[in-house]
Amino acid sequence: MDLENVGASLSALDAQVVSVDEQNWSEHSPRVGGSAASSAADDDSLLDAYSRAVTNVVGSVSPAVVNIEVHHAAGRTRSGEPHERRGGGSGFVFTPDGLILTNSHVVHNASRIEVTLADGRRMPASAIGDDPASDLAVIRVDEPGLTIAALGDSQKLRVGQLVVAIGNPYGFQSTVTAGVVSALGRSLRSYSGRLIDDVIQTDAALNPGNSGGPLVDSAGRVVGVNTATILPAQGICFAIGINTAKFVASRLLRDGRIRRSYIGVSGQTVPVHRRVVRFYDLPKESGALVISVEENSPAKRAGLRDGDIIVALEGNAVAGVDDLHRLLTDVRVGASGLLTVLRQTEKLELKIVPEEAK
């Protein structure tokens, strides 16, 4: 083969390669454009789903959210007239006959309470009871047939789960912020000085007037009662778990106050390893982890240690801190009982005599 024929063959081959490359480019380029368009559509779809979740929650729960204005006696003016201090917060209706759940620090020692409903109606309210130790309170308005907020289960919350905080601060109806559950099992010191255990941490922003409003999951169920924010920090807000709120509300309705047993530990809910659960045939797969034990407390005298996991009290299963709170009622004061704990992989029965909480 001479050089001219070789040159002609190479030129033909180059032309075929260019033709194939152009064909491939023309075939693939629409797919790339289509993929980008599809990705943008997917993003829009995700955003719409998020927006729909939040708007559905607001639409179902906000009619039950109320503004609470409180008046405190503050001595007398120079002319001798009574002087009052005003404060307020939010709350939500949880029974059709007008029972409202809010924070204790919102209504504690109030001389007069007024409630503004979501539809603008304003009416007086009376205090059923408040519990500074858990920063929860129940008040009542004399108005039947109110829209109520459905209560959920804070034990089923997961870190990263979408939550919506709704408030009615200073008369601005349905102030809404959305975020996620940042952490579970936090401890928060109430203004009475007692540690509130198993608190929900969220990045859904709270304003001072949002205190007492509901923290709601994407299904429109109340999973917490908004209670506090750390002012120097951003995105660190707290809510009392609704399971704790259910227990406190039931006792306030029955007795007007809560008389508690006290063992002297702070803790949080943690899972128990499945092998340990199966080996000891435990009824629950979680328990209350002891973070610290107070000196000269019933727990200290019983031999409880940091790191122990409480799984039962007098044969009643303890799946977490909420269960422990429910079991440490007034009937336990001064009554000897058996506390079942896991110490590493060992199961122990400790005799404990709870005292009445001061």
Image: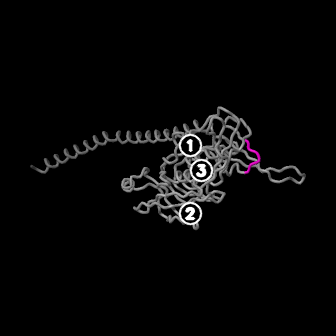
For the residues carrying marks 1 and 2, which lies nearer the camera in this image?
2
Q: Residue furthest left?
A: 1
Q: Which residue is mark 3?
A: 205
Alpha carbon of mark 2 to alpha carbon of mark 3: how far? 39 Å
Q: Which mark is residue 334?
A: none
Q: Is residue 336 above or below residue 153?
A: below
Instruction: Give the magenta range.
Output: 109-114
Q: Which mark is residue 222?
A: 1
Q: Which residue lies at the image location 38% right of the left edge and 56% below the top edge?
A: 276
State yes or no: residue 207 in magenta: no
How far across and down, in percent of the image, does residue 252 sit?
A: 64, 46
Q: Which residue is mark 2?
A: 298
State yes or no: residue 110 in magenta: yes
Viewer-proximal residue, 112 or 79? 112
Kind of residue indicated by mark 2: Pro
Residue 273 visible within the image: yes
Viewer-proximal residue, 311 or 117? 311
Q: Is residue 295 left or right of residue 22?
A: right
Image quadrant holding the C terminus, namely bottom right
Kind of residue indicated by mark 1: Val
Q: How many marks?
A: 3
Q: Which residue lies at the image location 64% right of the left edge and 51% below the top edge?
A: 258
Secondary structure at numbered mark 1: strand
How far across and down, in percent of the image, does residue 250 sit?
A: 61, 44
